[in-house]
Amino acid sequence: MTKHVHEPLVHLSRRLNVSQKYAWAIRIGAFVLSMLACALITMIIAPEVGFGAFFTHLFEGTFGKPRLTWTLFRDVAILLLLALAVTPCFKMKYWNIGGEGQALMGCIGAALIVKTLSGTMPLIVVALIALVVAIGFGAVWAVVPALFKAKWNTNETLLTLMFNYIAGCIGAFLVKKLNPRTTGSMSFLKTLGDFGKIGDNQFALIIIIVAVITVLMAVYLKYSKHGYEIAVVGESPRTARYVGIHNKVVVIRTLVLCGVLCGIAGFLIVVLKDQSFKAESATDTTMGGLGFTAVLVSWLAHFNPWAMVLTSFLVVFITTGCAHVSSFGGLRSATYPSVMAGIFFFFIIATEFFINFKITFRKRGEIPREPDDLPPEPKTKVEAATAANANA
Amino acid sequence: MSIFLAMIQEAIHYGMVFLFGSTGETLIEKSGHLNLGVPGIMCLGAVGGGLGAHWAHQAGAGAAGIMVVSLLMTILLAGAGGLLYGLFTITMRCNQNVTGLTLTTFGAGVLGFWGTQMSNKGITFTEPSRIAFTSPLFFSGEVPDNWFCQLFLSYGFLVYFAILIAIIAAVVLKHTRVGLSLRAVGENPAAADAAGINVIKYKYISCVVGAAIAGIGGTFFLMDASRGTPEYIIDAMGWLAVALVIFSLWRPAIGIAGSIVFGFLYRLPYNISALTVVTLADKELIKMIPYAVTALVLIVISFFNKRETQPPASLGVPYFREDR
């Protein structure tokens, strides 16, 4: 009897022990491919930008002048800080996509203080109060959804998403309340002036602060008891409960930490980076979607703070470089960099699949295994007895 | 026509953008996939719809021709976005939030880029919009000036199409075998698999069909609600559509009423100046209402914790048959 058994052409199985060499080869390959794809697509949609010119502009816009390079690393630092902030949340599988709103609340807090207090006391005191208020605002905005998650298991992805837009509306409200005549932005260039400059360099302080926080976060996640608890809660909430970890306490504590870091990021953006605050509408703010990008950066780095330095660098490199391509290649499109960043992300996300799964194709011409491959049924009692003896 | 009538009319008009988006997203979420790429998919849909309408108009097609080509292009582009999302999250089991956010970044970028190209070439969509989209379905000329006709019969084809799709989606989800299977896939894919439901097939179909429906929302916004004037805020509308899914408790029928409420609230900051004096700042507070109400709904449904009002149980969890 020949019964045909359907065997699929492709079979997926999880790779259990992935060598680091293999994983990095895949990732580097994907990065190279993504850059080639970006260049090709640019050539198709804008033939005036050539294949070589794409890369020339890309590097000119990022490493062409010392000032551009400093700007690049400053932006990397801000993005890295936001990614670090949301990382502990993701490690415990709390899908906080509210980094955008939490950092925006930090921006709002800092902007409010700088706007109302500057001139009444020394600048350094104003800045310190702004930092504290920014941290407070960020922490509150992060911890409220966490409280609901801990208390009633409210879906945190959707709630933090809503909180992003509520924060945006609050920002737009405050800007238009404080500055009724302007269009949704406040500049602090005059009040802050040279604040935070080290020598002549405006950006070094941000980079130093973020570097310190990166080291601290790496140590916190890897060597502290808190970091261990976060990992256990993420891996298995039941195990965590069994070994006596209070899941709810861990969730709330971690989200306070996340909010604090987002608040610091907001402070850095308003007081040191932009020296202004913009909230035109709920979706058009100073943050400009950085909080969402930070989610991607953190996830692409497998929640590893050191790898995040690399991923945030690559993301900023591509967006900054492509902005240069757009303005000097004659594209004149503000959103062209996000198209390119999207393509880059798709390539990198896809690497996860090739790292985690093994694809086995059915070999050509191989006869599918049949159910009657078993030894033939014994025909007589004697044969059955010998077969039984042989088996024993 | 009284100002209130006009406001409700506008609420219904704009609400349909959210209705298309939320019906599509509901179908996708019912299969267990939280597609945060829907705002991007709506942007891609708008690109397709705009291109299709422009081409058909150039080729001299009539109202029906423009509508058909535009919708086909919408479905093609938005469906491709859905397929891409499906490929990443269903077959490749990548993280849904990450893939969705990437798709939104990408889609919004494509819409902005395309829009700049169009305006550089001096292409507008007001003419095809007037011919095929905004002209009333039930009257050839002016709509009679009585409240019934104004309120219910004054819209273009896509408004009725949105409501029709929402009703069909509601019936399919609630009363058919396919809907039952789809809900089973979203609640517990392993059990559905064991019951002989082709989980992967269901997930793919719902991702692509949902994306196509959501994409029509983008086209509707560009060609109908904003009358062909390019406004590149479709991703912001898309997030409200995602919010509406929660607001409507994953039920497209409730979504019809919810979308009109959202449309009303969305237009309120622009319309309220006709009623009373408000500052620019106050308008921003009014804009907050849809998000705040949705957040409140989320908290309330989790507080009551009734099984009927919860998100699909395996929302966001990739399914791999060989995992335990």
Image (cartoon, grey):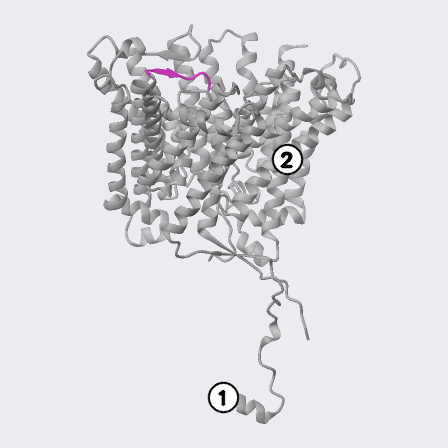
B68 or A130, nearer to the observer? B68
Q: Please state the horizontal and vertical placement of residue B227, each as a whole percent of the image.
A: 65, 17
B1 or B259, nearer to the observer? B259
Q: Which residues are magenta?
A: A275-281
Rate crowding at label 2 as few (under 14), some (14 to 19) or many (20 or more) other CA atoms within 10 Å.
many
Which residue is drawn at the image coordinates 31% and 54% (left, top)? A242
B314 left or right, relative to B140: left
Quadrant in the picture for the N terminus of chain A: bottom right
Which residue is drawn at the image coordinates 57% and 12% (left, top)? B271
Report which residue position mark 1 lands on: A390
Q: Amino acid at mark 2?
A: Ala
Q: Please state the horizontal and vertical placement of residue A67, each as a whole percent of the image.
A: 32, 20
| Residue B210 sits above or below residue A169 on the image | below
Q: Quadrant of residue A383?
A: bottom right
Q: For mark 1, give the secondary structure.
A: helix
In the rendering, which numbered label is found on residue A370?
none
Q: Please state the horizontal and vertical placement of residue B3, each as a whole percent of the image.
A: 63, 11
Q: Are marks 2 and 1 on the same chain?
A: no
B179 or B148, nearer to the observer? B179
Asked if residue B33 is among those painted magenta in the image, a careful observer would answer no
Report which residue position mark 2 lands on: B212
Nearer the observer: mark 2 or 1; the answer is 1
| Residue A197 sits above or below residue B24 on the image | above
Residue B301 can be seen in this image = no
Q: Please state the horizontal and vertical placement of residue A38, each as a whole percent of the image.
A: 51, 32
Q: For mark 2, give the secondary structure.
A: helix
Q: Quadrant of residue B154?
A: top right
Rate crowding at label 1 as few (under 14), some (14 to 19) or many (20 or more) other CA atoms within 10 Å.
few
